[in-house]
Image (cartoon, rainbow, N blue to C red):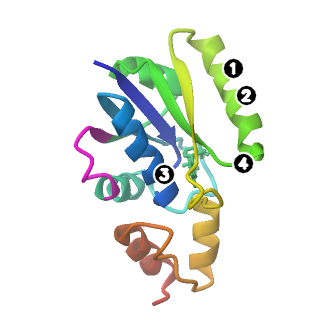
Amino acid sequence: MTIALYPGTFDPIHNGHIDIATRAAALFDEVVLGIFNNQKMKNVLFSPEEREALAKQAVMHLPNVRVMTYGGLTVDFAHAIGADTLVRGLRAVSDFEWELQMALTNRALASDVEMVCLMADQEWVFLSSTIVKEVAGVGGNVQNMVPPATAQALEAYFGHS
Ligand code: ADP
């Protein structure tokens, strides 16, 4: 059984994340969408519980995708859940440098965990959680960027209709 870990902050989950989770679900027997939580994380809008709840609603139609929250090293969490692959999404060249750094660091920490990058779909290639929060923060409509539960949570947070 192949288990892959798709780790990230998911603050909040958006359609680009869901696209990667959907495609990973077709490649692996099981995908764990791992929500990284660290007490020292600043600049995070939603609590780990809120991020987990939104992610769960967003992937509930994918039977082999589970959502879990974790802290500490991503490779340690991968070992704990029996995942030997990390899945990441690659948008632009700017993502590549960071992902390469992460891949090499993770490999130095745990050479048994491989990292696989899936290319972003062209529909979502410019989408990020930061953009979603910036648009929602000034009252913009994010309904074509995020699933309904995320849109509602952003609306509740920023108080726009
Ligand atoms: P992080 O904070 O680790 O960058 P994110 O929650 O922003 O985590 O993203 C998790 C993963 O999803 C990362 O691999 C990121 O590159 C990928 N990702 C984010 N946005 C998109 C998108 N629009 N299309 C494809 N992959 C994406």
Tell me the element at label 4: loop
> Do the residues bearing badges 2 and 1 touch, measured as CB atoms within 8 Å?
yes
> Do the residues bearing badges 3 and 1 touch, measured as CB atoms within 8 Å?
no
Residue at image location 32% in from the left, 56% down from the top: 53
Tell me the element at label 1: helix
Camera-side residue: 34 or 146? 146
Camera-side residue: 78 or 2? 2
Q: Which of the labelled discs sits on residue 17, or is there none?
A: 3
Q: Disc 3 beta carbon < 8 A from ligand 1?
A: yes
Which mark is in front, 3 or 2? 3
Give the x, y percent position of residue 7. Answer: 49, 37
Say which residue label 2 marks. Answer: 101
Residue 132 lies, with reference to residue 78, above or below; the image says below
Disc 3 residue type (three-letter): His
Disc 1 residue type (three-letter): Leu
Residue 1 lies, with reference to residue 60, above or below; the image says above
Give the Cα separation between the discs numbered 4 and 1.
19 Å
Which mark is in front, 4 or 2? 4
Residue at image location 45% in from the left, 56% down from the top: 47
Disc 4 residue type (three-letter): Ala
Say which residue label 4 marks. Answer: 92
Res. 14 in view: no
Give the Cα separation between the discs numbered 4 and 2.
15 Å
Say which residue label 1 marks. Answer: 104
